[in-house]
Image (cartoon, grey):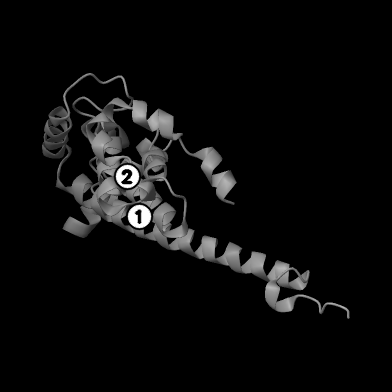
Amino acid sequence: MKARVQSLLPSRERLYRMRWLRWLAPHLNHPRLWHLNRKGLALGVALGVFFGLLIPVAQIPLSGTAAVLLRAHLPAAVASTLVTNPVTFGPVYYGAYKLGAWVINGTDDEASTPEAVILAATQGPAVTDGADDRPWWAWWRDLWTWLGSVGKPLVVGLAIVATAGGIAVYVVINAVWIGKVRLARRRRRARGLDGSRRPPVPR
């Protein structure tokens, strides 16, 4: 299972070359950022999903910073920001806007079209790849500009969706990992390969 998950994540060399993570270089050598285990993977994916759903700008630097601070699996945190992509962006943001409008006003905002919501969400320069040459502080400026342009319903909706998504992913990954480990143990025991079930040595 570890080998399969590792093959789906960006390599260590690729992450070291990312422009957005270079300022974190002095902190990227901690072994827990690269060691693939249940807690690190679950937390890394949860952080990536949280920031990937919450904002369309500076997703990788924010998720990477959080992973370094919390000692989560860094490749998983970066890769999971792709939860929002050109295919999922429109439905996610429009659904979040409708949810936020319902929470704030108790009803949907029927006057807002999907096109208007998506246009508001993408106002300002969005960070989408490592070719961005702007200084690191420009991420925070873009984020502040974006928050001021999208409106309260979308911000509230995205906060709810991102928090729920991050928690759900964390719980699911932990449950799947534990389930697979237990299943593997049962199979080993059934085959007589576990030390506690080893057949007696003939005398």
Q: Amino acid at mark 1?
A: Gly
Q: For the residue carrying disc 1, how many other residues have a C-alpha within 10 Å: few (<14), some (14-19), or many (20+)?
A: many
Q: What residue is shown at x 52% (from left), y 43% (from top)?
A: 6
Q: What residue is shown at x 46% (from left), y 58% (from top)?
A: 38
In depth, the one of 67 and 96 nearer the eye is 67
Q: Is residue 19 left or right of residue 149?
A: right
Q: What residue is shown at x 16% (from left), y 24% (from top)?
A: 135
Residue 166, which numbered label? 1
Disc 2 + disc 1, Cβ < 8 Å: yes
Looking at the image, can residue 84 be seen?
A: yes
In depth, the one of 128 and 44 nearer the eye is 44
Residue 53, which numbered label? 2
**Residue 109 percent coordinates (x, y):** 23, 48
**Residue 163 percent coordinates (x, y):** 29, 56
Residue extending furthest toward the right: 203
Work out how far the residue at label 2 is from the one at label 1, CA to CA, in angstroms: 9 Å
Residue 74, which numbered label? none
- Tell me the quadrant of the picture where the C terminus can be found: bottom right
| 15 shown above or below 200 | above
* Helix, strand or loop at mark 1: helix
Q: What residue is shown at x 23% (from left), y 41% (from top)?
A: 111
| 181 shown above or below 72 | below
